């Protein structure tokens, strides 16, 4: 029994010794193989260093340039992914005021770009006009004596008359008396032909005075000759049309009494007419006398009438901001009627070549004009531009864009959706990286590893009570405590939310802590808000 026990103890000792020896053997083998394996490991490290050292993620920023960051990936209200910002990253990746859209979304939105090019703009000025008679071809029939309309010979408005055609017959006691005076004077001249020279001169002077009176009353030569030859006075006088044309206005009624100067007829020659075109003041500088014009009228869609600009009126209509421009044109067959509306196209001489972009590339907000420039694939920068002349398809850019730059010509209104682009443009004045989230959650979160003092550089902090919320305009009134960074006293003022999501969960009477920036002079925008104490 003792022998058996000793044997087992000895066997255990031997196994322990063998195990120790094996461990020593394999341990030394491992150390020996370390130098051989080291080159491979070093190669991996060297390859990684040669490729590029891994950058440290700082935070995720709003893709539209809004002052909004997040420590975790998220999407903005338009569904675009927030952009990762790395330590020591490319400065352009962090450029403020730029709009970033993934290539997939660019393709989905149908964004199309075109290079700004040098070209000469051939402009056609278009204006609405109306047809009017040529004022120089209007004739008025107004008797110069008192009388009565005895008989109407042309008794309808719009009737066509020839030159010399009888219009009406008039009776006037004054006219009859003047005829008798002339007839008596003419007979006296004949009777005194053998009398002394003084008597003949007096009678001739009386006859000439009576004749001149009849001529001043527009009595025709034929009627005067008939009166001189026969000596018989006529009861009525026939008035004839002094020109060929259309009766535009007829006030004469049979049997009516008229006074000297009363207009009884107005006749217009419509063989040539005027088009009074209302040209907008921004196009006025290009319109000159002698410019060719093409006139289209709805009544004759298959016809085009050619005319010439003969006069640019010196006055402007304040109600429409237009200046009347007169275009003269022939009216063959009297197809064109006064009072018709017309569309006028004025050919304007080409300007010197300049940098131009398509009209669709221009975003006009009313206070400024912008163009979206593609900085690189998926990255767009809004540029404020100054524009010049424009044609039907392009507009001249005087400053803001250079030749060859790619501008967005399609789907730019999607990139400009809501207020996102306005916030990006507002970043021109004070570009900076915010440290508070504007995601609209209960509390904003500072970006991890944000540099001290960054928040103070881009915004201000406030504490106050919400008085009123206007969801339609995206604004709310806050009675806040004193703001030391701006040296503001406690007061109630209106702020604008950076995006609609900030208003979610807010109610009047809620006490909040908030961060705000001045996006434009006098425009204070809240970029982050949370209930007080959270």
Image (spheres, rainbow, N blue to C red):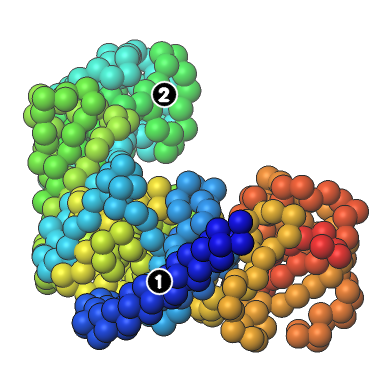
Q: Which residue is found at the position 48% from the left and 58% from the top? A: 82
Quarter of the picture holding the N terminus: bottom right
Q: What element carries label 1?
A: helix
Estimate how packed mark 1 is, as few (under 14), some (14 to 19) or many (20 or more) residues with alpha carbons within 10 Å: few
Q: Where is residue 61 in the image (x, y as percent from the top left)?
A: 51, 65
Can residue 194 be seen by looking at this rendering?
A: yes
Q: Which of 533 and 420 is in front in this view?
A: 533
465 lies above or below 427: above
The residue identified by callout 1 is 18
Displayed quadrant of residue 50: bottom left
The residue identified by callout 2 is 251
Q: Where is residue 192 in the image (x, y as percent from the top left)?
A: 18, 43
Q: Where is residue 436 in the image (x, y as percent from the top left)?
A: 65, 69
Q: Which residue is found at the position 83% from the left and 53% from the top? A: 468
113 lies above or below 425: above
Displayed quadrant of residue 32: bottom left
Q: Where is residue 513 in the image (x, y as percent from the top left)?
A: 80, 66
Q: Which residue is found at the position 24% from the left and 51% from the top? A: 112
Q: Which mark is residue 27?
A: none
Q: Which residue is found at the position 40% from the left and 62% from the top? A: 99
């Amino acid at each position: 029994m003792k022998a058996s026990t000793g044997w087992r103890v000895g066997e255990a000792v031997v196994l322990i010794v063998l195990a120790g020896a094996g461990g020593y053997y394999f341990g030394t083998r491992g150390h020996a193989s370390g130098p051989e394996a080291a080159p491979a490991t070093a190669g991996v490290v060297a390859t990684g260093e040669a490729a590029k050292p891994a950058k440290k993620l700082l935070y995720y920023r709003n893709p539209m340039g809004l002052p909004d960051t997040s420590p975790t990936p998220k999407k903005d209200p338009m569904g675009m992914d927030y952009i990762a910002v790395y330590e020591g990253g490319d400065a352009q990746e962090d450029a403020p005021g730029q709009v970033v859209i993934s290539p997939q979304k660019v393709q989905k939105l149908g964004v199309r770009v075109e290079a700004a090019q040098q070209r000469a703009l051939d402009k056609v000025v278009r204006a609405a006009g109306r047809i009017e008679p040529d004022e120089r071809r209007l004739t008025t029939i107004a008797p110069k004596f008192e009388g009565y309309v005895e008989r109407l010979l042309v008794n309808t408005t719009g009737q066509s008359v020839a030159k010399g055609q009888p219009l009406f017959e008039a009776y006037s006691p004054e006219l009859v008396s003047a005829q008798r005076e002339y007839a008596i004077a003419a007979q006296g001249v004949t009777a005194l032909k053998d009398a002394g020279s003084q008597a003949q001169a007096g009678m001739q002077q009386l006859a000439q005075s009576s004749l001149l009176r009849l001529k001043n009353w527009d009595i025709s030569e034929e009627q005067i000759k008939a009166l001189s030859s026969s000596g018989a006075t006529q009861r009525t006088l026939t008035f004839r049309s002094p020109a060929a044309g259309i009766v535009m206005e007829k006030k004469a009624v049979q049997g009516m009494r008229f006074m000297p100067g009363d207009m009884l007829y107005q006749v217009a020659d419509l063989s040539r007419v005027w088009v009074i075109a209302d040209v907008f003041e921004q196009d006025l500088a290009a319109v000159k006398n002698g410019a060719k014009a093409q006139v289209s009228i709805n009544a004759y869609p298959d016809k085009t009438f050619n005319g010439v600009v003969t006069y640019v009126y010196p006055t402007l209509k304040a109600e429409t901001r237009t200046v009347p421009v007169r275009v003269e044109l022939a009216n063959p067959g009297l197809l064109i009627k006064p009072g018709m509306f017309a569309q006028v196209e004025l050919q304007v001489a080409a300007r010197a070549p300049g940098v131009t972009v398509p009209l669709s590339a221009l975003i006009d907000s009313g206070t400024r004009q912008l163009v979206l420039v593609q900085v690189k694939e998926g990255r767009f920068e809004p540029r404020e531009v100054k524009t010049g002349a424009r044609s039907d398809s392009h507009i001249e850019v005087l400053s803001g864009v250079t030749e060859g730059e790619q501008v967005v010509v399609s789907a730019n209104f999607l990139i400009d959706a809501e207020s996102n682009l306005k916030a990006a443009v507002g970043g021109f004045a004070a570009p900076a990286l915010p440290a508070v989230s504007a995601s609209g959650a209960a509390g904003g979160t500072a970006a991890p590893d944000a540099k001290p003092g960054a928040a103070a550089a881009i915004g201000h902090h406030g504490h106050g009570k919400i008085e009123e919320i206007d969801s339609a305009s995206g604004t709310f009134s806050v009675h806040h405590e004193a703001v030391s960074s701006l040296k503001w006293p406690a007061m109630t003022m209106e702020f604008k939310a950076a995006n609609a999501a900030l208003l979610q969960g807010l109610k009047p009477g809620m006490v909040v802590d908030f961060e705000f920036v001045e996006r434009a002079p006098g425009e204070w925008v809240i970029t982050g808000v949370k209930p007080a104490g959270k």
